[in-house]
């Protein structure tokens, strides 16, 4: 199953496609800026905009050790490391993502603050209590045993450590349509309801501090993106097109329809592991 998930995201020529996209945008592929990479290296709904929102929830401090679960091309990890002057370790199931993340990190000279490892969220290669905080953006949809994921995150966090999740949850109205950005079929797609998400986190030992739907933000972002395209501009988030190519259009259409009719619900969660001060 892990191989099927990784194969969904990887075609073997990602760096070449990214370099071509940057060149088409007028950026230097050998000296890209964070702004030039932002449309591509934040591979989750709303891209950089969602990363900024997630970071605002983080009670991170300078020199903290933070874990990014499902780190993709590394855009969020690099942003968080630079913003908080902390160290971010990213893990991802897809080797090609980790390779590209390391390459981009070297170009941006952030190797001292970000590292990327191939890893499974259900069996992470880290000692207990290794991290001050953790976050995950649009990752758990590929994980069937979310209880095991939450327990594993709890294990690697220090007492009082924090966790921020930004995910797609199951809504009402039946099964979703495929493909999506995270799966070609139900074989590798495992959505749970917001209520199940909250209950699973609590059962794993987390205190839920904040829990909300970000559907309003999704809709506003979609409106702005469509207006940009209508004006002849490129949309602000192009990672799905970069990674999925010809499948991207159908994937995005199915996701938009799922949010519109309530079969999918985007959620954002801040929680805290027992044993420390409460999150702000």
Image (cartoon, rainbow, N blue to C red):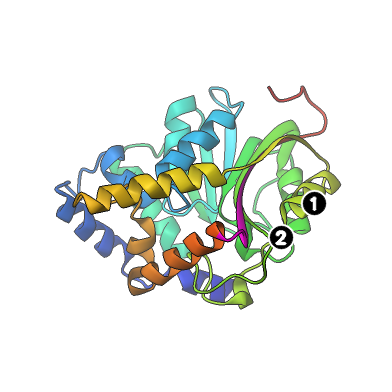
Q: Secondary structure at mark 2?
A: loop
Q: Quadrant of the N terminus?
A: bottom right
User: Which residue is drawn at the image coordinates 34% and 49% (left, top)?
Assistant: 225
**Residue 272 versus residue 97: which sits nearer the camera?**
272
In percent of width and height, residue 197 lies at: 74, 51
Q: Specify the label residue 136 is tagged with.
A: none
Q: Is residue 104 visible?
A: no
State the residue position of label 1: 200
Quarter of the image holding residue 274?
Answer: top right
User: Which residue is drawn at the image coordinates 77% and 47% (left, top)?
Assistant: 198
Q: Quadrant of the C terminus?
A: top right
Quarter of the image holding residue 149?
Answer: bottom right
Q: Is residue 235 visible?
A: yes
Q: Residues within 10 Å of mark 2 (few under 14, many from 20)?
A: some
User: Which residue is drawn at the image coordinates 55% and 75% (left, top)?
Assistant: 3
Magenta-colored span:
261-270
User: Which residue is drawn at the image coordinates 64% and 72% (left, top)?
Assistant: 175
Q: Specify the label residue 192 is tagged with.
A: 2
């Amino acid at each position: 199953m892990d191989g099927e998930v990784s194969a969904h995201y990887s075609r073997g020529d990602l760096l070449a496609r990214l370099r071509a996209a940057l060149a088409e945008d007028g950026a230097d592929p050998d000296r890209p800026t964070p702004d030039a990479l932002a449309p591509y290296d934040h591979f989750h709904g709303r891209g950089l905009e969602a990363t900024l929102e997630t970071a605002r929830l983080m009670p991170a401090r300078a020199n903290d050790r933070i874990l990014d679960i499902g780190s993709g091309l590394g855009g969020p990890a690099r942003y968080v490391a630079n913003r908080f002057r902390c160290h971010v370790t990213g893990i991802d199931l897809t080797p090609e993502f980790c390779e590209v993340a390391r390459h981009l990190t070297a170009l941006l000279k952030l190797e001292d603050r970000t590292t990327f490892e191939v890893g499974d969220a259900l069996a992470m290669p880290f000692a207990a209590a290794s991290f001050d905080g953790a976050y995950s953006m649009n990752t758990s949809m590929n994980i069937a045993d979310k209880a095991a994921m939450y327990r594993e995150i709890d294990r690697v966090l220090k007492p009082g450590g924090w966790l921020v999740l930004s995910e797609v949850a199951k809504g009402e109205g039946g099964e979703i349509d495929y493909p999506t950005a995270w799966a070609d079929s139900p074989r590798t797609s495992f959505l749970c309801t917001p209520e199940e998400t909250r209950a699973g986190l609590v059962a794993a030992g987390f205190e839920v501090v904040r829990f909300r739907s970000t559907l309003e933000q999704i809709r506003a972002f979609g409106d702005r993106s469509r207006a940009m395209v209508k004006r002849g501009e490129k949309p602000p988030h192009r990672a799905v097109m970069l990674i999925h190519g010809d499948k991207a259009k159908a994937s995005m259409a199915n996701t938009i329809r799922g949010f519109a009719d309530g079969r999918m619900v985007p959620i954002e969660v801040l929680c805290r592991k027992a044993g420390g001060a409460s999150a702000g």
